[in-house]
Amino acid sequence: AANDLFNSRKFGQAKGEYQSVVDVKKGSELLADRAKQQITKIKGIQKNLGNYTKIYDQALDQTGEGKYTESNSTLDKIFSDKSIHQKYYADILKKAEDLRNKNNDAISGNSSSSSNDFDSSNSDSNTSNNPNVSSNKSASLTSAEKKAAAAYKGSNEYTVTQKQKDLNGKPITQAQINSARQQISAAGVDSNAMSDQDVRNIIKGAHQKGETIGQYVKSRY
């Protein structure tokens, strides 16, 4: 079961199953040793996933601001990493490739919109993964930005409506999102690979189904 979960990239659940093997008293030492090796491997995979997700989120923010060229430069940190093409990272790689395609479509539609943005961010290109958010640029969208926003199919924080952020007419708070992420991770699903809006959608879906967040994600992810 643990190996099946691992091969399905459900690393959180797999780690729990391997830990159960390790914890068995008077169990097979060989199986316990193999389980320990897998747990160590999963920890490394989860660390890499966390790093890739931070970079992806930064690029997503930059796309939301219309900084398409800068977003592509940020995504290059993912594509240039030697581990990214391993099968464990297929999901985040696909999301990064899709975002790059949306950026390229926007650049082709209005190539002049990204040159100044790229120049202004050169000094930040090798700094931390925290996005350099400029609120005054996100207040209004140019025609090229609207085109990119319309083309993007993911849960981009810059394109969702207020209604999508609400539950029963009240905004879903950051505290609720953070709590939900913990419950999602506890259910064996990688919440780090989700945007805040992805988490909001899970909160709303669980509420509508009358299920806990753990029950909801286990049956759908």
Image (cartoon, rainbow, N blue to C red):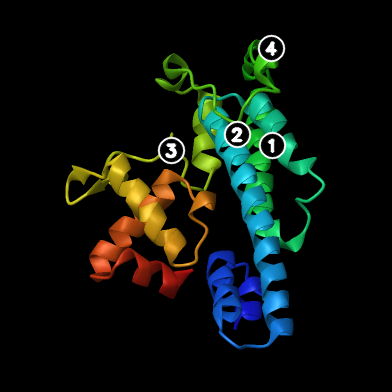
Q: Are marks 4 and 3 in contact (CB under 8 Å)?
A: no
Q: Which comes before the other along the chain, label 4 or label 2?
A: 2
Q: Which comes before the other along the chain, label 4 or label 3?
A: 4
**Nearest to the observer: residue 94 or residue 34:** 34
Give me the residue at 27% from left, 70% from top: 211
- Mark 4: secondary structure: helix
Q: Which comes before the other along the chain, label 4 or label 1?
A: 1
Location of residue 93 with respect to 69 vertically, above or below: below
Whole-percent x, y for residue 74 in the image: 68, 31
Q: Are marks 1 and 2 in contact (CB under 8 Å)?
A: yes
Whole-percent x, y for residue 127 in the image: 66, 23
Q: Are marks 4 and 2 in contact (CB under 8 Å)?
A: no
Disc 1 residue crowd, few under 14, some 14–19, many 20+, Cα 10 Å: many
Give me the residue at 62% from left, 37% from top: 55
Amino acid under disc 2: Ala
Q: Which residue is mark 3?
A: 157
- Which quadrant of the structure image shows residue 37? bottom right
Whole-percent x, y for residue 104 in the image: 69, 34
The residues bearing labels 4 and 1 have C-alpha atoms spaced at a distance of 17 Å
**Nearest to the observer: residue 215 or residue 94:** 215
The residues bearing labels 1 and 2 have C-alpha atoms spaced at a distance of 6 Å
Q: Are marks 3 and 2 in contact (CB under 8 Å)?
A: no
Amino acid under disc 3: Glu
The residues bearing labels 4 and 2 have C-alpha atoms spaced at a distance of 16 Å
Q: Which residue is mark 2?
A: 59
Q: Mark number for residue 119?
A: 4
Disc 2 residue crowd, few under 14, some 14–19, many 20+, Cα 10 Å: many
Q: Which comes before the other along the chain, label 1 or label 3?
A: 1
The residues bearing labels 4 and 3 have C-alpha atoms spaced at a distance of 24 Å
Q: Which comes before the other along the chain, label 3 or label 2?
A: 2
Q: Which comes before the other along the chain, label 1 or label 2?
A: 2
Give me the residue at 35% from left, 54% from top: 180
